[in-house]
Image (spheres, rainbow, N blue to C red):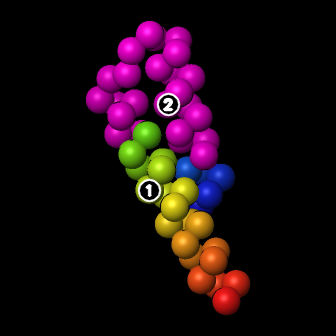
């Protein structure tokens, strides 16, 4: 999940740099990617305990 989140956020940044602006799709991708990353991080930490 963490890798998927990082990839989604990375693609968002690359798209924003290429286009020079962030649209709604990139914003949604950034929010969802960050959410997935942190959920994965939480689950990883919880399973390690």
| Above or below: residue 15 compared with residue 31 | above
Residue shown at 53% from the left, 39% from the top: 9
Q: Position of residue 23 (x, y in %)?
A: 32, 23
Drawn side of residue 21 relative to residue 4, left or right: left
Residue shown at 65% from the left, 52% from the top: 3
Q: Position of residue 27 (x, y in %)?
A: 36, 34
Q: Which residue is mark 2?
A: 12
Residue shown at 64% from the left, 84% from the top: 47
- How busy is the neighbourhood of tag 1: few (under 14 within 10 Å), some, or many (20 plus)? some
Drawn side of residue 45 relative to residue 28, left or right: right
Residue shown at 44% from the left, 56% from the top: 35
Q: Which residues are magenta?
A: 6-29
Q: Is residue 18 magenta?
A: yes
Q: Is residue 24 magenta?
A: yes
What numbered label is drawn on residue 35? 1
Instruction: Identify the image quadrant of the N terminus.
Output: bottom right
- How busy is the neighbourhood of tag 2: few (under 14 within 10 Å), some, or many (20 plus)? many
């Amino acid at each position: 999940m963490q890798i998927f989140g990082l990839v989604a956020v990375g693609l968002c940044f690359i798209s924003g740099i290429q286009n020079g602006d962030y649209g709604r799709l990139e914003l949604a991708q950034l929010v969802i990617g960050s959410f997935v990353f942190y959920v994965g991080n939480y689950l990883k930490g919880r399973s390690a305990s």
